[in-house]
Amino acid sequence: MLKRSISLCLVLLAGLSLSSPVLAEPGTSAQETGAAAANVAEPITIQRLADLRFGRFASPSTPSTIQITPAGAFTPAGDVVSSTQMAQPANGRGPAQFRVRQAGNRGGTVRIPETITLRSGGNSMDVTGVQGTLTVISGFGRFRVYRLDLGGTLQVRANQAPGSYVGDFDVTVVYN
């Protein structure tokens, strides 16, 4: 019985050796074609449509706030209320808006900042309580296009220095 086991092993080893291209007889060959594949996902895209705009107002004598909701509602509070009726810039007041196009098979998570800092020279104001709303504007299923509206509350200090205050912020879409 021991002889049989050794013979089987030798036959199996011999069979493996014959299939190896290193031991092929000269002048014979075999070839097979393989394939490689990749699937590149269509990217999620985001495009800025409008900036977050708090408008023009006079420097208040006491701390004040101006809130712009994602829906565009304007709510001033404090000493700044009396000066919000002055002439406004051409683009007026309103929420920031972005267009987000979903990738074919992929969903995503939109990340917005918690706070935005606006600066003019060495002076600053913060936008707190940043909120966003996603609204489907076209498409269906996994091919939707959304509008992202962002609002927040501008914190205006007493005797805030005059100037044109601006601040950049990031909105990020992360694949799920």
Image (cartoon, rainbow, N blue to C red):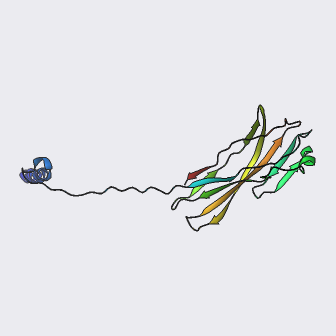
Q: Relative to the observer, which residue lies in front, 165 or 20?
A: 165
Q: Relative to the observer, which residue lies in front, 48 or 22?
A: 48
- Residue 84 location (% of width, % of height): 88, 49
- Residue 102 location (% of width, % of height): 57, 59
What residue is rendered at 64% in x and 57% in y? 99
**Which image quadrant is residue 164 in?**
top right
Q: In the displayed orientation, state which residue is furthest to the bottom.
A: 140
Q: How many marks?
A: 0
What residue is rendered at 52% in x and 55% in y? 43
Q: Relative to the observer, which residue lies in front, 152 or 3?
A: 152
Query: Does residue 105 appear left or right of residue 126 in this picture?
Result: left
**Which image quadrant is residue 159 in?**
top right
In the picture, the quarter occupied by the N terminus is bottom left
Q: Relative to the observer, which residue lies in front, 28 or 94?
A: 94
- Residue 18 location (% of width, % of height): 11, 52
Q: In the displayed orientation, state which residue is furthest to the top.
A: 122
In the picture, the quarter occupied by the C terminus is bottom right
- Residue 158 location (% of width, % of height): 88, 37
Query: Does residue 27 appear left or right of residue 36 in this picture?
Result: left
Query: Does residue 126 appear left or right of residue 62 in this picture?
Result: left
Up the image or down, 79 lies above or below 145; here it is: above
Query: Does residue 10 appear left or right of residue 43 in this picture?
Result: left
Up the image or down, 159 lies above or below 20; here it is: above
